[in-house]
Image (cartoon, rainbow, N blue to C red):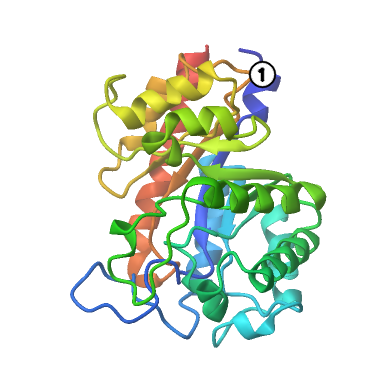
Amino acid sequence: MSATKQNDLIWGLLLHLSYNMWADRDVPDWHEHVSYRPYLRFDESLWNDLLHQAAEAGANMILLDLGDGVVYDSHPEIAVEGAWSPAKLRHELQRVRELGLEPIPKLNFSTSHDAWLGPYSRCVSTNGYYAVCRDLIREIVDLFEGPRFFHLGMDEETAEHQRHYEYVVIRQHDLWWHDLLFYVEQVEAAGSRAWIWSDYVWRHPEAFYARMPTTVLQSNWYYRAEFAPDIDRVRAFLELEEHGYDQIPTGSNWVLDQNLPDMVRFCTPRITPAHLKGYLQTIWRPTLESCRGRHEHGIAALREAKRVYLDISR
């Protein structure tokens, strides 16, 4: 593989400004940090350290989950206490760029992960809801100065994934597709490319391949140790390739630290260079000092994954 192509490959790290995406209330006796909080959970000293560590590890993209962590000009009512002003966000994005990292926005519009929308999470698929989503997408694209991609989330919209919510909303059939394509249309109209989690394909492969535009960038995610084509979540990498989708396979240290390096070993020979746009590492912890160790282990795994890729590509 050419040096030019290697340098074009994305090595991304997902970080969170907001972490209000797992429940709409305080949930005792469940995973730490998943409860909704009306204030920003974010340590800037850790943010600064992680940006430098990511750049030193060879990352070249930060996917930033914004949620209710910004006082949006269009909808300031969404913001939690301590949220960043638009000026603060612009300043931090410039710092990200100065480290050689490309900042990309993320808002998860799945109803299993949209507690950050506040009152609008209880207005899904109404005209007012669509207007808010349109406003936010346009404003964020402007704040990010025309980002290459815009991650829309759209994972895990099931009853099981909302079992700790007080207010449960599940779109399915044509309505799920209507709303997904609405978000995609808004992103594309603003000049960016839509990016989603791909797990809808695990449950609805026929509908997915019939209706999902190939213009939508796919991140199939898998966090376990075994990579075998008979595992549906692993097979999805191969089927997305067969159907012509661009991919950024996504790993995590949620279960084990070596997941992303192992993913690179599996996916790199099996996804054509034309469709393999890069890899993404996720930590699934808020940007809090108490989570520093997990973040640093995840970045170390990203460094190892890039080394594995370069060894394979020689």
Farthest-out residue, left? 29
**Residue 8 rendering spot, x and y as whole percentages:** 67, 29
Q: Which residue in the structure is indicated by mark 1?
A: 3
Q: Position of residue 202 (x, y in %)?
A: 38, 35
Query: Quarter of the image holding residue 28?
Result: bottom left
Q: Is residue 206 above or below residue 33?
A: above
On screen, residue 197 versus residue 136, left or right, reads: left
Q: Residue at x 25, y 33 (%)?
A: 225
Q: In terms of secondary structure, where does tag 1 sit? A: helix
Based on the displayed image, in which of its 4 quarters is residue 11 positioned? Answer: top right
**Residue 176 shows up from this direction:** yes
Where 294 falls versus 291 (above or below)? above
Query: What amino acid is labelled 1 in the image?
Result: Ala
- Residue at x-position 46% and y-position 17%: 311
Write the residue at 64% across / 75% down: 70
Please indicate whether residue 27 sits to the left or right of residue 136 in the image.
left
**Relative to the observer, which residue lies in front, 227 or 207?**
207
Instruction: Residue 194: give x, y in percent of width and height.
Output: 66, 45
